[in-house]
Amino acid sequence: MDPAKPKCRLAEIIQYSCKEEYDADGVPTPRCWPVPRIFRLCPGRPAVEVTRYVNVDMKTGEIDIPSTLNHQLPKAKPWRDVKRYASKEV
């Protein structure tokens, strides 16, 4: 790795997926499950979600990053470069 290039880092956020469940009396109670998401953050570049490409040891939290990660990731661009076109209403 070139020491002149800034290093990328990983960041994790936890989101929750929830579903309403009902008890025997019909009282609703939310039940939620954690959904971890992992992002690669590189200076001067957009963040890219890499959750589907990495392996996470659920016991230790250790993340294994495949050496082929750069070849698997989709191309990303900053939000300022995303163009949105108005769709024609029918």
Image (cartoon, helix red, strand yellow):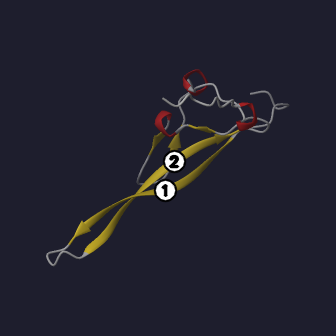
Query: Residue at the spot x=52%, y=44% of the render?
Result: 63
What residue occupies the far front of the structure in this picture?
A: 90
Q: Residue furthest right?
A: 4
Callout 2: few (<14), some (14-19), or many (20+) C-alpha neighbours within 10 Å? some
**Callout 1 amino acid:** Gln
Where residue 21 appears, as percent x and y from the top left, is 25, 66
For badge 2, the amino acid type reads Arg
- Residue shown at 48% from the left, 29% from the top: 90
Mark 2 or mark 1, which is nearer the start of the sequence? Answer: 1
Q: Which of 69 and 19 is in front in this view?
A: 19
Question: Crowdedness of circle 1 by 10 Å Cα count: few (<14), some, many (20+)?
Answer: few
Left or right, residue 12 beside residue 80: left
Q: Quadrant of residue 77?
A: top right
- The percent position of residue 5, horizontal first and vertical second, equals 81, 31
Q: In this view, does 85 lie to the left or right of 90?
A: right
Q: Mark 1 points at which residue?
A: 15
Mark identifier at residue 62: none
Residue shown at the point (41%, 51%) measured from the top left: 58
Q: What element carries label 1?
A: strand
User: Is 26 drawn above or below residue 84 in the view shown?
Assistant: below
Q: Is residue 31 left or right of residue 77?
A: left
Q: Residue beneath label 2, please?
A: 37
Q: Do the residues labelled 1 and 2 touch (CB within 8 Å)?
A: yes
Give the mark toward the camera: 1 or 2: 1
Report which quarter residue 19 is drawn in.
bottom left
